[in-house]
Amino acid sequence: MDWPTLRRIALFAVALTISMACAATGKQTVCTITVNSADEKEAFRRQLPESKYRFVELVEAGRPDWLASACRAGVACDVLVISGHYDGGNEFFSDRLETQEFLPVDEMERVSCSDSCPGLFSRLKEVHLFGCNTLNPEAQSAASEEVVRSLVREGRSLKQAQQHWKSLNAVHGESSRDRMRLVFKDVPVIYGFSSVAPLGPIAASTLSAYFRKNGPREIGLGRPSSRLLAQFAPFALTVTQGMTDQDPHAAMRRDVCQFADDRLSDANKLDFVHELLQRRTGEARIYLDRIQRLATALQSPARRTPEVMQEFAQISGDAATRARFLEFARDADRPAVRARMVKVARHLGWLTIDEQWQELALMLGDLQARREVGIGDIDLACTLNQAHELDGVFSRRVPPGPGDDVAHAAVRACLGSSEARTRTLDGLTSTHEADVQIAQAYLRHRPITDVAELRQVAARIAAMSPSEAQVRALEALGRHYLSDRNILEMLVRLFSHTTSWSVQAAIAGILMRADQRSIASPELVRTLRENRLPAPPGEHMTDALIRRLQAP
C-alpha cells in the first residue's frame, strides 16, 4: 500500500477517533480553516479549555482537496473558525506567497448543497468568519434597470416593473452575507464583518480581551453574544443566521443549489438553466455568472454526453426564449454584461460564430456612440479583440466631436485603427491626467513594441511639465521592459533636472525594472545621490534603487 493511501487512512482514523472521543466526553469540536494568519485560531485555542473543546485544523498543507479530505474523514464541527483574506465573493486566500491553500466559496456551496459532507456543517452551532466583508449586505449580482425597460416592453406598468426589479435585487442579489447564509444552512449564529476586518494580530488581541472579561462560557451555545459584538464594535463585527427552509431567501438557495449540487448530472443542470431562462425577465441576468460558468464548462468534448446534447438541442430550438434573451442583452446598461450574454448565447446554440461577432460589433458600435467612455470599456474592447478578429470595425477616421476624445480613440485603437492608436498615444503626454489614464489602460493591452516609437514617446514624456500627469505617463512607460540605452540615459537626465520628487520616484521605479546591465555604474549612483530632491520621511524608491545598484 502506497504512502498517500496510508496517510489518508490514518487521517480518517484520527478524525473518527476524535469524533467518538468528543461524543463520549461531551467535548465540542472547534474546526479551524486557516488560509492566512493563525492568530485568531491561537486566540481561541489559548482560551478554550481542553477539557471542553477539541481543535481540528481542516487545511492540509500542500493538498488542494483538503476540504473534500475532511469530508471523507468524517469530521463533525460544533464551532468553525475561518481565517483568511476574503475577496468579497469568490474565495478566502492568503497574502503569503509561500501559501498555496485557499477556500473557494463555490466549493463551500458544493459541500453545503450536495449533502456530501453532512457532518462537517450540519452540527454547527456557530461560525466565525475572520475576513473583510464576509457579511457585507450589498448585492453583488444586482439587476440593472434594463430589467425595468424589458418588463415595460412586455406590457407591465412602470410601477409594476420597478417593484419586480427591487424584488429581484432583494431576493437574488447574492450579497456576501447571503452567500454565507446559504452555505451555513440552519446554523443559528454566523459572525462576520460588514466591511473591513481587523488584521490577524488585532483580531486576536480583541478576542483575548473578550475572553479575559467573559471567559469561554458563550462559545458554542448557538446564541449570539452581545458581549462579543460589543468587543468588536470598532471593527463592524455583525451576526446573522443560516437560511432555513422557511427563509424568504429559501427559493434563491434552491436555485443556487441547482448549479452547485454535484449529485445532479450536467444534463439536469442544463435543463434547470433552460427553465431559468424561461422565467420572468431579469432572473437569468441575476444568475449570469453561474450560467456562463456551466455553459463554458459544457463546451468540453468530455462532458458532451448524449443527454447534454439533447438538452442543448432543446434550448437552441427555443426561439421565443432566444429572442427575449438577445433583446435583453442588447438593452443591457453595461457593455461588459452585454458581451457576456452574447457569449452565453453562442454557447447555448443561439448564435453562430459569425452572428456572435456581428452582435459584438453592434455592441461596440453602440459603445462608440456614447458620450462617455471609461477605462472598463477600453479593457473590454481590447480583450474582445485580443486575437484581432474585430480589426477594422472602426478603422474610418472620426470627425471632430464627442467621439473624438482620447477615450473613444482608445476603443477604436483596440479594434485595429492606426489613426486612433496615434491619437491615443498622444493622450499619454496630455496635460489632462484623465487622458493619460486612458492611454495607460490602452497600453496595458497593446504595449509599444517598436524601439523607435518607444524613444519618441519617452522623449515627449521627458518634455512634459512636472505633474501627476507626467508621473502617470512615466508609470505607463515603465510597464515596458526597457533596455534601450538612449531611453535610459534620457530618464537619468530627467531625474537630474526635474523639480518634482514624485517624478524622481517614478523614474527610480522604471530603472529598478530596467535591464541592470544597461544602467549599473558608479556614475549613476553618484547622479542619484547628488540630484535627489527632498522627499517626505520614510523609505523611497530611490533608496531601493541605490542599494540594488551597489549590490555585489
Image (cartoon, rainbow, N blue to C red):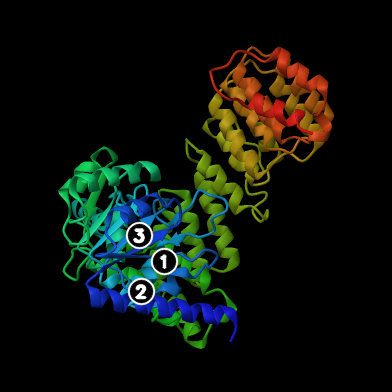
Residue under numbered circle 2: 75
Q: State which mark lies toward you, 3 or 1.
A: 1
Residue under numbered circle 3: 286
Residue under numbered circle 1: 58
Residue 45 versus residue 408: which sits nearer the camera?
45
Dot 3 and dot 1 residues touching (CB under 8 Å): no
Instruction: Name the quadrant of the N terminus.
Output: bottom right
Q: Which element is circle 2 on?
A: loop
Q: What is the spatial separation of the Cα atoms under label 2 and label 1, in whole angstroms?
A: 9 Å
Residue 46, given in percent of the width and then of the height, sits at 32, 53
Disc nearer the start of the sequence (3/1): 1
Residue 12, given in percent of the width and then of the height, sits at 43, 79
Q: Is residue 199 visible?
A: no
The amino acid on which the numbered mark 3 sits, given as a three-letter code, is: Ile
Residue 472, given in percent of the width and then of the height, sits at 60, 28
Dot 2 and dot 1 residues touching (CB under 8 Å): yes
Residue 335 versus residue 48: which sits nearer the camera?
48
The amino acid on which the numbered mark 1 sits, given as a three-letter code, is: Leu
Q: What is the spatial separation of the Cα atoms under label 3 and label 2, in whole angstroms?
A: 35 Å
Say which residue appears at 36% left-offset and 79% top-offset: 16
Horizontal side of 281 relative to 159 (left or right) equals right
